[in-house]
Image (cartoon, grey):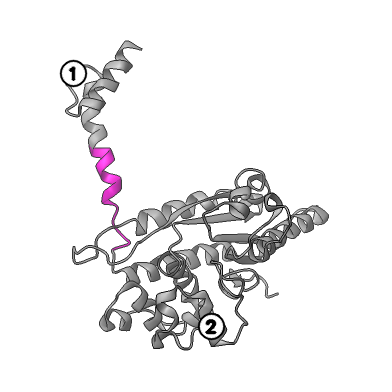
Amino acid sequence: MADPAPAAAAPAGSLLGGAPAAPAPAPVQGSADDARAWLPGEFREDPTFKDFRDVAGLAKSYKHAAQMVGLDKGQVLRMPKGADDAEGLAAVWNRNGLGLASQAVLAYDQRLALLPAYLQQLVMESLGKGVQCDGSAVVADTVPVWWGGAGTDVQHSFFQALHQGTAIVPADFVGTVHNDDPYATSHQALLSNLLAQAEALANGQPSDDPHRAYPGGRPSTTILLDALTPQSLGALLAMYEHSVYVQSVLWGINAFDQFGVELGKQVASTLLPALRGESKASDPVTAALIERLRIG
């Protein structure tokens, strides 16, 4: 691999070339007819999607994504062009095409343990909007809930739900090819877990015992950094930032304000005097809770 490599999305086990995210006949890559089995029913016969093969194919034409979220031609023409938009288009596809309301980020390098928390703020604060830039209501669901953790830790907490739960959760697996410590064997074991989880989510495993059956068809994207360097970390963050921008343009929202954050701060500033006994809260539930706090 190039040294140092920017973040790159690998196709195996992901919406960029892996199993479909919903129960459907497994598509053969390169066959548009079979690949349309990935689409929700209302899109399968739509001529706009005649060349659809996978999300990588979707990225070649913004008309597809635009129709999905109801944008007009003028908005589509303002979209940035390039293959780097695939991450943002995959996110829109998962949210609006497949109706998935949650996104997991799984870092298989302890040095990236805080990446899910960073992305949670980046994505949800930027895209958690219900109105477009012109003040009108959005025409499609916007941001899903982002969450995650360090890979091997969370394998024993919420991976049960990812594999066998009723809700399908797209996942980003993030890892490094080369580590900078002397524990090469341990790093290989870490990478084997990353690859195994992506494969298991995509392919599942049948069983005569329904409790031991894994449905598969759970989408994921594998992102591998050649090494964790300032350049590769910056490229990784820039990829997610660009993804946020692409989604904001498709949804017609302003990714650069945060009025929802400000409201809670404003209310808090009025409640501090109430907690000190200098005033009363106007909301009866809050007033009762403040009274309980004083008694305690």
**Residue 185, horizontal then vertical, whole percent:** 83, 55
Mark 2 lies on residue: 53
Residue type at mark 2: give it.
Arg
Indicate yes or no whether the magenta region holds residue 263. yes
> Which is more foreground, mark 1 or mark 2?
2
Q: Is residue 81 magenta?
A: no
Q: The residue tagged with tag 1: helix, strand or loop?
A: loop
Q: Residue at x 28, y 83 (%)?
A: 73
Does the residue at mark 1 contact the one at mark 2 (Cβ under 8 Å)? no
The quadrant of the image that shows the N terminus is: bottom right
Q: Residue 198: image x %, image y %?
A: 66, 62
Residue at left 68%, top 53%? 210
The residue lying at 73 percent from left, 59 percent from top is 191
Q: Is residue 6 visible?
A: no
Question: Is the magenta region chiefly helix, strand or loop?
Answer: helix
Q: Quadrant of the C terminus?
A: top left
Q: In the rendered image, is residue 31 in sight?
A: yes
Residue closest to the far front: 208
Q: Which mark is residue 278?
A: 1
Q: Which residues are magenta?
A: 254-266
In the rendered view, would you say 284 is above or below 122? Answer: above
Residue positioned most to the top? 295
Determine the image quadrant of residue 192: bottom right
- Which amino acid type corresponds to the residue marked 1 in the rendered image? Glu
- Residue in the picture at 29% in, 52% down: 258
